Image: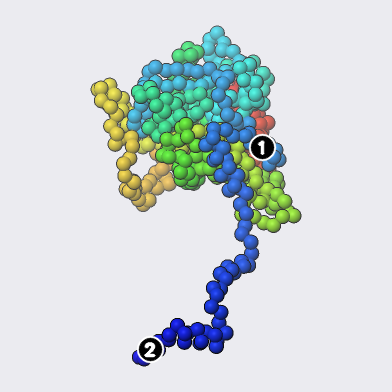
Amino acid sequence: MRRRFFSQQSYRKLASAAGASTTRSPPKQPPKASNPQLSFPCLDKREQKTQELSRGHLKSIQSTSLESGPEPSYGFVTTGFHTYKSKKPIFLDYGGHLREYQLAYETWGKLNREKSNLILIHTGLSASSHAKSQPNNTKAGWWEDFIGPGKFIDTDKFFVVCTNVLGGCYGSTGPSSVDPADSERYATRFPILSVNDMVRAQRELVRDEFGVEIVYASVGASMGGMQSLAFAWEFPNEVEKVISISGCARSHPYSIALRHTQRQVLMSDPNWNRGFYYDKIPPHVGMKLAREIATVTYRSGPEWEYRFGRFRADESRPPALCPDFLVETYLDHAGEKFCLEYDANSWLYVSKAMDLFDLGAKHMNAVVQQRQRSQEIHNGGQATLKHEVVPKEPYEEKNKVPQQFSVEESLEDLKRGMRRLANKDVLVVGVESDILFPVWQQREIANVLIENPDNKTGNIEYFELGTDISNYGHDTFLLSLEDIGKPVKSFLES
């Protein structure tokens, strides 16, 4: 191949002949995009919030979409409650123990001379002990119009006690509490809890604070409905009546899956820092998104159709990827309001306790043995074995679906497990529009107890709210008080 070389003079002649300029050409402008980039005010707001938190301050949340319908009056509670402090260790179902603990509680009404009128109220996942206003906290409680003189739980007749659960963050010992062993916060060194662990702590409070050996009624909704059954399972001779509203006898895979997604979103927030975020920027983004997912499960589609329809927040503006529809702005504000009110680690631990709930015989036998083993290790002067509490490697599937119980075997196992409740007076309330605790789970509780061959004296009542009565979904127990309250009042006072 022949190559031609030009002298500098020859090159200039060629360039001149071609009309080329020896001066440098201006840089090319980038091509103009077909459309402008979208703006993301929701992300800007989130980043601004992180910056404000890093500086140690944050303005109060202003929300308008929550005013478009009735909402539960859960709120951040730091004062106005009593505190029960136990110096005795509590041994836990899944290994480990707490060498001491405390429970926040509030009371209404008066304990009678016979100490026979105490009603124990169990809370849902994110509720405090503040079920009703009282002199030390005059703010409306989450069951404000349900409890009181002449109301559905009548404080003229009953002495009512409500606690913040073990593992919570409104005055009770939980992951945000200080470990007495080293004066540092527990964070994710806190042991895994069960619902039954929670009620065993409550039982100590009832006996130590009030000298009550037999509770008149154990009452709860949602996770509280689980606790009401668990209390009767743990102490069948120490409770007369049991009320479970929108609860279950064992968590269903669908509910477990929903709570799993919430925890995964929360744990994916880099500020979560494997649970060690105290005195730093909290994982407010993960907490906000987890609450939004949870809120979807608390209400029903028909109610949102009625409240929001397909309306957008501002029809005059173009669609956006940030909250745009009214239902989206509702979820956004609900998550924003909640994300700094509840401790993220408590959310993880308490929701996991809900997943683990199962009153079947096989499960309960296993956890009782585990707890006894933890106590034996402690009494022998040994530290709890770490491998019993904290997994070091990802779990591998050992249980395959075909090896699980059949439907019939599973139901029979539940019947055996719930024999301890067979002779109790139990009211079960179900809500047809509930998607988080489907109504068939409440029917299951009632049927298992009614069909139990050991049931000789127990009065089992079942009451169901159809969609013609309430479309509030899982939150019905907080919002349709008249419909829930009538059967409760009748059962308690019969």
Looking at the rendered structure, which numbered label has been put on residue 177? none
- Residue at left 51%, top 43%? 286
Taking 420 as reference, is 69 above or below it? Answer: below
Q: Residue furthest top?
A: 113
Answer with left or right where residue 143 lies relative to residue 411: right
- Residue 302 locus on image (x, y percent): 66, 47
Q: Residue furthest bottom?
A: 2
Q: Measure how far apart labels 1 and 2 are at the Cα level.
A: 76 Å
SS of the residue under disc 2: loop
Report the front residue among 16 and 94: 16
- Residue at left 35%, top 23%? 181
- Residue at left 42%, top 35%? 276
The quarter in which the N terminus is drawn is bottom left
SS of the residue under disc 1: loop
Q: Amino acid at mark 1?
A: Gln
Lower position in the chain sequence, tag 1 or tag 2: 2
- Residue 391 locus on image (x, y percent): 33, 40
- Residue at left 61%, top 66%? 33
Taking 199 as reference, is 357 above or below it? Answer: below
Q: Which residue is mark 2?
A: 3
Pointer 2 local density, CA inside 10 Å: few below 14, some 14–19, many at least 20 = few
The picture quadrant where one finds residue 222 is: top right
Q: Amino acid at mark 2?
A: Arg
The picture quadrant where one finds residue 365 is: top left
Q: Which residue is mark 1?
A: 62
The quarter in which the C terminus is drawn is top right
